[in-house]
Image: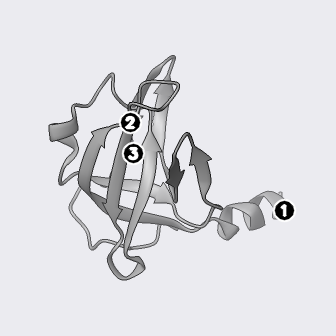
Amino acid sequence: MDNLFKSFKDLDIRVGTIVHSEYFKEARNSSYKLNIDFGELGILKSSAQITKNYSIESLIGIQVIAVVNFKKKQIANFFSECLVLGAVDGDSVVLLKPISKVKNGLRIA
């Protein structure tokens, strides 16, 4: 159990606001490219397979929760810099987000 808790503590999970979204036409699975503002950490990019529940326009201004300390991952011609978290139900994803607006970059503990 101690190793599992340490693994969780090693994750840097933060709150950020989506400031830009566009369709990721080169992706194998239907996806969006997201730019997410994490405050002092800056703007990080992510690819997210969330097209079933969200339109490009509806994502702007939404605060999300993401892991920001994974290695960059190349997806087609795009480098994803963070992993946006969501609840997965089959091929549908619902984004995890704070109930109330908080400062971008706050750490999830």
Front disc: 2 or 1: 2
Quarter-wise, where is residue 106 in the image? bottom left
In the image, residue 84 above or below residue 51: below
* Residue 58 pos. (x, y %): 16, 39
Front disc: 3 or 1: 3
* Residue 63 pos. (x, y %): 28, 56
Residue lying at 45% horizontally and 66% vertically, measured from the top left: 14
Q: Is residue 48 left or right of residue 5?
A: left
In the image, residue 52 above or below residue 32: above
* Residue 94 pos. (x, y %): 38, 33
Quarter-wise, where is residue 72 in the image? bottom right
For disc 1, the neighbor class at 10 Å (few under 14, some 14 to 19, many from 20) is few
Residue lying at 25% horizontally and 68% vertically, measured from the top left: 102
In the image, residue 19 above or below residue 9: above
Q: Is residue 87 left or right of residue 12?
A: left
Q: Secondary structure at mark 1?
A: helix
Residue holding disc 3 = 96
Residue holding disc 1 = 3
For disc 2, the neighbor class at 10 Å (few under 14, some 14 to 19, many from 20) is many
Q: Is residue 10 left or right of residue 68?
A: right
Of mark 2 and mark 1, the one earlier in the sequence is 1
Q: Amino acid at mark 2?
A: Phe
Q: Amino acid at mark 3?
A: Leu
Residue holding disc 2 = 24
Residue lying at 47% horizontally and 56% vertically, measured from the top left: 66
Residue lying at 75% horizontally and 62% vertically, measured from the top left: 7
